[in-house]
Every structure is written in C-alpha cells, then in structure tokens.
Image (cartoon, rainbow, N blue to C red):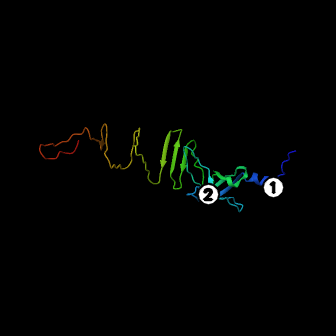
C-alpha cells in the first residue's frame, strides 16, 4: 500500500505564502540585470531577475529603488523567484493616458501614441538623435519651427523658396554686362 508522507501544515502554508509576495525594490544592479526586494518583514530576496520581454524583441526596463513590486516564486522556491510586476503608488503614479500608450522617463520625457487620433508624440527635455546609415525617408509634409542646419547638400526636385523668393524662378534686376553685380532677386 502506497502512503504519502505526512506533510507539515506549516510548511505548506509557508510555501503557499511564498508563491507571490509584495515588496519594495531595495537595490538594483544594472550590470547584472538583478534587483533585491525588501519584503518589509525583515527579510529581503537574493539578487533576482525582473520580468522583461525577451525574445525576437527585447525590452529592457529596469525597476527603480523604492518601487513596489510583486515577486513570484514558482512552487514557493526562492531560488526560482523573479520580480513579476510593479504597483502604482503616489511616488510612481500611472500616466492616465486613456486609450493612448506611453512611456514616461525619469527626466520627464514622454513618448506617446494615441490610436484614436493616430498621433505619435515625443515630449523631450533635451535632444533627439536618429542614426540610420541607410538613410531616413519621410513621406509627409514637414513643418519645422526653428533653425535648420545641414552639413551636406540640400537637394530639391521642385524648388526652394526662402522669404517668398523662388530659388528656381526668381529674376534679377539691374543686370549689366561685364563684371558688375546684379540686383537682389525679385
């Protein structure tokens, strides 16, 4: 006759209690990709992984010290524990963007896409850089507010207009033969 060993009810309760625990990020090791969680009962986790999307597309989103999180330990095994999710708090409030999707960064920068208005927006406190060795193609009407500098050639298939003067179609007055200079374009 097969008999199962008697289990200690306290051990079972402890294992169940360790399946999912709440805590606060105590430290983050960005080089190792691990964080330590303080469970608030005098215990902390060992350095453990945080949940990230990893596959053909990988997303690196490190937790922040002081952030409230949940820690999952499959079968109550602390050696397999990982940080699964974070909880909004007064310190780390959600963005409340409605149907839009966004990312807010520590310095206040926000990248947002609103599927209802079909608008992608960047609100940056600093600068932006695009590195694309094969080029960038914009299929749009582009409006620039501010100065534009170019270190290479500017080519236009149709025309370039500056202050109402067409580069292609303007004329010069006061033209005389020889080495004299023409007047300003009209």
User: Where in the figure is residue 170, as x and y percent of width and height?
Assistant: 24, 39
Query: On the rendered image, what quadrant is the N terminus found in?
Result: top right
The residue located at (48%, 45%) in the rendering is: 121
The crowding category of the residue bearing disc 2, from other C-alpha atoms within 10 Å (few below 14, some 14 to 19, many at least 20), is: many
The residue located at (52%, 43%) in the rendering is: 113
User: Where in the figure is residue 45, as x and y percent of width and height?
Assistant: 67, 58
Q: Identify the disc placed on residue 10.
A: 1
Query: On the rendered image, what quadrant is the C terminus found in?
Result: top left
Q: Nearer the viewer, residue 109 or 138?
A: 138
Q: What element carries label 2?
A: strand
Furthest residue toward left:
178
Furthest residue toward top:
158
The crowding category of the residue bearing disc 1, from other C-alpha atoms within 10 Å (few below 14, some 14 to 19, many at least 20), is: few
Residue placed under numbered mark 2 in the picture: 35
Q: Earlier in the sequence, mark 2 or mark 1?
A: 1
User: Where in the figure is residue 128, as x and y percent of width and height?
Assistant: 44, 51
């Amino acid at each position: 006759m097969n008999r199962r060993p008697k289990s200690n009810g306290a051990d079972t309760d402890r294992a169940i209690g360790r399946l999912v625990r709440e805590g606060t990020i105590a430290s983050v090791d960005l080089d190792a990709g691990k964080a330590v969680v303080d469970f608030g009962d005098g215990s902390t986790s060992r350095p453990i992984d945080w949940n990230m999307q990893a596959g053909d597309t990988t997303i690196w989103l490190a937790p922040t010290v002081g952030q409230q999180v949940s820690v999952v330990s499959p079968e109550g095994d602390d050696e397999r524990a990982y940080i699964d999710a974070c909880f909004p708090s007064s310190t780390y409030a959600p963005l409340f963007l409605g149907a839009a999707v966004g990312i807010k960064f520590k310095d206040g920068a926000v990248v947002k896409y609103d599927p209802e208005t079909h608008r992608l927006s960047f609100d940056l406190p600093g600068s932006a850089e695009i590195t694309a060795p094969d080029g960038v193609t914009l299929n749009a009407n582009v409006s620039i507010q501010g100065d534009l500098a170019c270190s290479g050639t500017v080519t236009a298939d149709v025309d370039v207009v500056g202050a109402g003067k067409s580069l292609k179609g303007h004329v010069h007055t006061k033209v005389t033969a020889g080495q004299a200079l023409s007047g300003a374009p009209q």
